[in-house]
Amino acid sequence: MRWYGISGLGADKRVFSRLTLDFELISIEWIQPLKNESIEDYSIRLSHSIDQSIEFGLLAVSFGGLIAVEISKKLNPIMTVLISSAETKQELRPIFRGIGKTRLVTLLPNLFFDPPRKLAHFIFGTNQKELLNSILDDTDLNFAKWAVNELLNWKNTQQLEQVLKISGTNDKLIPPSKDEKIQLINGGEHFMIFDRAEEISKIINEGFKLNRSLK
């Protein structure tokens, strides 16, 4: 079995670096979206990085979770782990859907998607400010604009059969839904994959063992 990691908006494999997992995680590199490409079509193109000849699982964080859901709907991984993310559009803040309907994002300049660092520190809620700054500095703003627009207009309502969701109780960006299946990290914020990596790793490893025992 092989596991693939999909990082958050504009981020890279650094966000997975503190996880201690019972399996190897291969980080999928982002590709550039095509003009007017939907998140569904983008996810299909990104999935070409996955070797489907053997069983595989997906582990994704934040916006990467939306991509993982779309891939899972097409390729049926053995298990999908969503961290600080959402499984359906109903789990996103209603205000996101409201803004998405206005199509305002498409009119904003790319620089709008490079937030002031103090604001980003507050929204993401992390003590790892240098790492977050580095990730933001390396973010392709054209990709960020596309991703934000797709997040605001995400239409998925389909739930996955084999999914493990982990959310922080203090996540300001994507608060945990009322789904009883969600594993909560008390006090965890949006960047908790780095700040609370030990707790998250334990939940993932236990979920993976349970999944395999049921096969």
Image (tube, grey):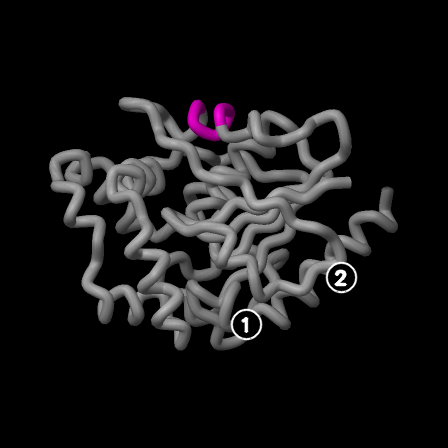
Front residue (pair 52, 178): 52
State which quadrant residue 180 falls in.
Answer: bottom right
* Residue 97 visible in image: no
Q: Please tell me whether mark 1 sits on a helix, a strand or a loop.
A: loop
Q: Is residue 107 above or below residue 19?
A: above
Front residue (pair 80, 97): 80
Give the residue type at disc 1: Arg
Q: Is residue 115 left or right of residue 144?
A: left
Q: Please tell me whether mark 2 sits on a helix, a strand or a loop.
A: helix
Q: Please state the horizontal and vertical placement of residue 139, each as a whole percent of the image.
A: 32, 49
Q: Main SS type for the magenta part?
A: helix
Q: Please state the horizontal and vertical placement of residue 209, each as a whole percent of the image.
A: 81, 55
Q: Which residue is mark 1?
A: 196
Q: Residue at x 33, y 24 (%)?
A: 34
Q: Residue at x 60, y 34 (%)?
A: 72
Task: Say whether residue 88 is magenta.
Answer: no
Give the residue type at disc 2: Glu
* Residue 122 visible in image: yes
Q: Which residue is mark 2?
A: 206
Q: Is residue 8 above or below residue 198?
A: above
Question: Which numbered disc, 2 or 1, marks the residue that appears first in the sequence?
Answer: 1
Q: Is residue 65 left or right of residue 96?
A: right
The local crowd at label 1, few if under 14, some if 14 to 19, many if 20 or more residues have their Cα within 10 Å, is some
Q: Is residue 120 left or right of residue 30?
A: left
Q: Residue at x 49, y 67 (%)?
A: 192
Quadrant containing the C terminus is top right
Q: How many marks?
A: 2
In contact (CB < 8 Å): disc 2 and disc 1: no
The local crowd at label 2, few if under 14, some if 14 to 19, many if 20 or more residues have their Cα within 10 Å, is few
Q: Which residues are magenta?
A: 41-45
